[in-house]
C-alpha cells in the first residue's frame, strides 16, 4: 500500500505525472481479478489528474488529497456516474447530484478510479451479497474481503486505490479493513454528512475512510467533515490530523473481558501483544466491564432492519428502481419489481424489519430495542469514565473462505465487536495488529467517546508507529511504483 505522502511526493518531484500515475491505477483496476470495482471512471479520473498536472506545472503546491487515486463505495452518490448499491434494483441508477462527502473530496482534487463493490445495500459482512459477485481478499484471494465495504478495502490493500470512502452502519468500514490488513475508521455519528449516502439504517449510517496508514485515514476524514446544512444530523468535527502526536502517555486503555471470550488463539495472541505495545508506549491498562455486549447484536439487527424496511420502501419500480414487466394491477407490478430487484439478504432484512414493526407488536421488539439502545449508550458513557479508550478485537475471527455457506445468524455474529460503536454513535478505528496461521490479517479496534475521533486515531497512530506498520497488508498486486 502506498501512502498519500508517497504518492504526492512522486508527483511533486515529477518522478511521474499525475496523469501517468492515474493511468497506472486505471489499468490495474481494469485488469483486477479481485472484483473490487463495480464501475471504473476513467473520464473523471483523467480530467482530475490533468488539472493536478496543470497545477504542478504552474508551480503550485498540492492540497492534502490532491492527485490521490481513490475508490468510493457504490452507495455514495456520484453525479453522472452509476451508483448501484450492488443491487439489481439500482443497476441503471445514475444520480444527478453528488453526496456531500464526495463533493468535498472531489473539491480537494482526489482522483476517482471507480466505484467500490459492496454487499447489496450495505447489508452483509462478507461482500458476498453483491449483485456483481463477491470481492476477493488481496492478501489471499481464496478468502473473502469482508463487508460491506468489500471493494474499498480490497482496492486499498490490493493497490488499486490509495484510499477509499466507505460506509459503516454496523462495522462495514472496520470489518473489511481488518480482513484485508488496512486501516478503517468509523467517525462519530454526525461527524460527516450522510446526504447522498443511500440510506440503510439512518440512525446508524456513517461514511468512513479506509487507507494504508492512520495518517491517511485522518487526512481523508478531515477532507469530508466540512459543514453541510443539508443534513440535519451533521455536526462536523475538529480536524483530527493535527491531533496525531503519536503519544499515548497516561492514556487509560480499557479492556472488557466480554470482548475476549471464545477468541481463536491467533486473534487472542495478537490482541495480547497489541495491549503490551500500547502499555510500553506509556498507556495505562485498566479493566472494565461491558455486560451488555451480547445484547448489542439482536438490538442492532432489530433496529437496523426496522429502519431498512422503511428506507427501502421507496424502491417500488414506479418512483424508483428496477421495474418488472407490468402485471395486471399496480400492486402486482410493485410486488414483481421488488421481488426481482432485491436479493435474498435484502429481502430477509425487509421481512425482519416489517415483522418487528407490525401493528400491535411494536413494543415487543422495536420499542424494547429502542429502550435498550439508551441503556447501552449509558453503559458505554459510564465505562468511559474509567478509561479513555476501549480496546477490543475488530472481529472475533479472521476472514473465511469464499463461498462457504453459513447460516445468516452465524454471519451476523461477525459484527459482535463493531456494532456497539454504531449503537452508541461513538468513533472506532480498526488497525492491523497481526496475522493468523494462514497469514490473514487480524484487526485491533479502539473505541472512544463521541467527538473524540482525534484521540481514537492518535492512539491508533501511536500503535502504528510503535510497530512500524508491521501488520499492514503487503501484497504484490495492483500498482507497483
Ligand atoms: N454487517 C452489518 C450488517 O449486515 C453491518 C453492515 C454495515 O455496516 N453497512 O448489517
Image: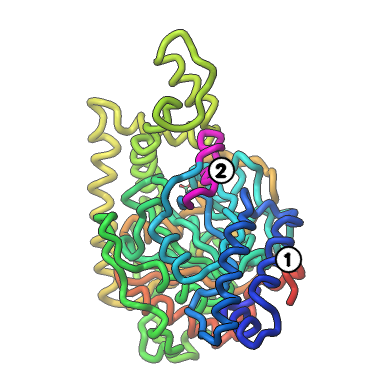
- 35 and 113: which one is in front? 113
Q: Main secondary structure of the magenta part?
A: loop
Q: Residues within 10 Å of mark 2 (few under 14, many from 20)?
A: many
Determine the residue positioned at 35% across, 30% down: 354
Rendered position, 390 above or below 101 = below
- Residue 32 percent across, percent down from the top left: 73, 56
**Disc 1 target residue:** 478
Q: Residues within 10 Å of mark 1 (few under 14, many from 20)?
A: many
Disc assigned to residue 58: none
- 51 and 13: which one is in front? 51
Q: Secondary structure at mark 2?
A: loop
**Disc 2 target residue:** 86
Q: Which region of the structure is painted magenta?
A: 78-93
Rendered position, 329 above or below 419 = above
- Residue 9 percent across, percent down from the top left: 61, 85
| Image-quadrant location for residue 387 | bottom left
Q: Earlier in the sequence, mark 1 or mark 2?
A: 2
Amino acid at each position: 500500500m502506498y501512502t498519500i505522502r508517497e504518492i504526492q511526493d512522486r508527483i511533486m518531484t515529477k518522478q511521474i505525472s499525475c496523469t501517468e500515475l492515474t493511468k497506472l491505477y486505471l489499468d490495474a483496476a481494469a485488469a483486477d481479478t479481485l472484483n473490487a470495482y463495480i464501475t471504473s471512471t476513467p473520464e473523471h479520473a483523467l480530467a482530475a489528474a490533468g488539472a493536478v498536472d496543470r497545477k504542478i506545472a504552474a508551480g503550485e503546491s498540492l492540497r492534502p488529497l490532491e492527485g490521490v487515486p481513490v475508490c468510493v463505495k457504490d452507495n455514495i452518490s456520484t453525479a453522472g456516474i452509476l451508483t448501484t448499491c450492488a443491487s439489481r434494483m439500482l443497476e441503471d441508477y445514475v444520480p444527478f447530484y453528488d453526496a456531500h462527502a464526495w463533493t468535498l473530496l472531489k473539491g480537494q482534487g482526489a482522483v476517482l478510479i471507480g466505484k467500490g463493490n459492496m454487499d447489496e445495500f450495505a447489508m452483509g459482512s462478507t461482500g458476498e451479497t453483491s449483485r456483481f459477485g463477491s470481492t476477493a481478499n488481496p492478501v489471499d484471494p481464496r478468502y473473502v474481503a469482508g463487508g460491506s465495504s468489500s471493494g474499498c478495502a480490497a482496492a486499498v490493500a490490493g493497490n488499486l486505490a490509495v484510499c477509499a470512502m466507505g460506509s459503516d452502519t454496523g462495522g462495514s468500514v472496520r470489518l473489511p479493513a481488518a480482513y484485508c490488513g488496512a486501516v478503517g475508521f468509523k467517525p462519530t455519528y454526525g461527524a460527516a454528512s450522510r446526504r447522498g449516502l443511500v440510506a440503510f439504517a439512518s440512525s446508524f449510517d456513517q461514511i468512513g475512510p479506509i487507507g494504508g496508514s492512520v495518517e491517511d485515514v485522518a487526512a481523508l476524514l478531515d477532507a469530508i467533515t466540512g459543514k453541510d446544512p443539508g443534513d440535519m444530523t451533521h455536526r462536523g468535527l475538529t480536524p483530527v490530523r493535527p491531533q496525531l502526536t503519536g503519544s499515548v502517555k497516561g492514556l487509560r486503555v480499557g479492556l472488557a473481558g466480554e470482548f475476549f471470550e471464545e477468541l481463536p488463539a491467533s486473534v487472542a495472541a495478537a490482541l495480547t501483544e497489541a495491549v503490551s505495545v500500547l502499555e510500553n508506549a506509556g498507556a495505562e491498562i485498566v479493566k472494565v466491564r461491558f455486560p451488555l455486549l451480547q445484547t448489542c447484536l439482536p438490538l442492532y439487527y432489530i433496529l437496523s432492519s426496522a429502519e431498512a424496511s422503511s428506507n427501502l420502501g421507496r424502491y417500488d419500480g414506479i418512483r424508483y428502481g428496477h421495474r418488472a414487466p407490468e402485471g395486471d394491477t399496480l400492486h402486482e407490478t410493485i410486488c414483481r419489481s421488488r421481488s426481482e430487484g432485491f436479493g435474498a439478504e435484502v429481502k430477509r432484512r425487509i421481512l425482519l424489519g416489517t415483522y418487528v414493526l407490525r401493528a400491535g407488536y411494536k413494543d415487543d421488539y422495536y420499542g424494547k430495542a429502542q429502550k435498550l439502545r439508551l441503556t447501552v449508550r449509558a453503559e458505554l458513557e459510564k465505562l468511559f469514565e474509567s478509561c479513555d479508550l476501549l480496546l477490543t478485537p475488530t472481529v472475533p475471527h479472521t476472514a473465511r473462505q469464499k463461498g462457504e455457506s453459513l447460516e445468516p445468524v452465524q454471519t451476523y455474529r461477525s459484527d459482535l465487536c463493531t456494532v456497539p460503536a454504531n449503537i452508541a454513535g461513538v468513533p472506532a478505528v480498526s488497525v492491523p495488529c497481526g496475522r493468523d496461521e494462514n497469514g490473514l490479517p487480524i484487526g485491533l479496534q479502539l473505541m472512544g467517546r463521541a467527538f473524540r475521533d482525534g484521540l481514537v486515531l492518535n492512539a491508533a497512530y501511536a500503535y502504528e508507529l510503535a510497530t512500524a506498520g508491521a501488520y499492514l497488508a503487503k501484497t504484490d498486486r495492483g500498482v507497483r511504483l
